[in-house]
Amino acid sequence: MLANMDHEIYTQLAKTKLLPLYTATDLSCLDKLEEVLIKNDVRFIEVTFRSELAAKAMKKLSASGELTVGAGTVRSLKEAEIAVENGAKFIVSPAVVPEVIDYCLTRDIPVFPGTATPGDIQRALEYGIKVVKFFPADIYGGLKAIKALSGPFYDVQFLPTGGIDKNNFVDYLADAHVIGVGGSFIISEAAIKKDNGITADAALKELVEQLKEN
Ligand code: 3PG
């Protein structure tokens, strides 16, 4: 079974361009998180399986239907199942994980496997997946690597994550092969906790403004 690359998640990501990566350790921050994302019209969030609260956070953030919630750091079939049961609409993995990809493809759930090498990208392509996560982007050559990989993989689009920040994200997005950027720089629990979201809101607003200018 091949991936459905016409899925609306890809169109949505290409439009929003920012995929916040969020690790939840305190569920009381989620209302404010949702509020700040909606206010800035960034209606995407990837909740990582890096905390025990991941599933609960996905469920809570999915409840209102205002955000498109995905699961990140999905390394096993079990995690993919839990994610989808709790409202995740897309799956992001740090690597190419066949059991996760098979599960997603049979359910028409967009999956972004983590890739860093031509071999990884080729494996993703064998499933028909033409949008891949490029991770860890900064360590594996950043934009220079994406440009080189886009030669042979001219029909692939990249979602770089890892080391992306407010100073370099627009450079990545200027590349036609970059569909969007992901990372913890977009919003974080720590920023929300600081002053009930004021800092997080201001920082996100600045990113969105930078996006509009470019
Ligand atoms: C990921 O899993 O995509 C990365 O850990 C994100 O890296 P960052 O924290 O540098 O954004």
Image (tube, helix red, strand yellow):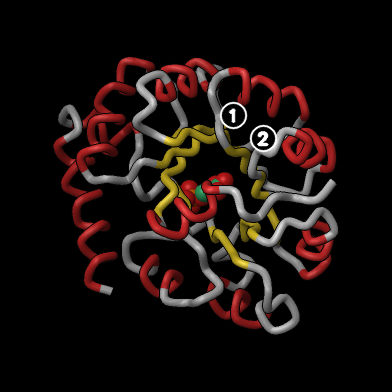
Q: Nearer the viewer, residue 128 or 145?
A: 128
Badge number at residue 159:
none
Question: Which residue type does callout 1 highlight?
Answer: Phe
Q: Residue 194's quadrant in the figure?
A: top left
Name the one closer to the observer, 12 or 213.
Answer: 12
Q: Which residue is mark 1?
A: 49
Q: Nearer the viewer, residue 185 or 101?
A: 101
- Kind of residue indicated by mark 2: Val
> Tag 1, which secondary structure?
loop
- Marks 1/2 in contact by CB < 8 Å: the verdict is yes
Q: Is residue 136 above or below residue 1?
A: below
> Left or right of 64: which side holds 124?
right
In the displayed structure, 103 sits above or below 140; it is above
Q: Is residue 72 left or right of residue 174?
A: right
Q: Position of residue 53 (x, y in %)?
A: 51, 17
The percent position of residue 207, horizontal first and vertical second, equals 26, 57
Does the closest atom of ligand 1 sit within 8 Å of the Cβ of label 2?
no
- Gap between marks 1 and 2 measured at Cα: 6 Å
Where residue 74 is drawn, which disc sits there? 2
- Judge left or right: residue 92 versus residue 188: right
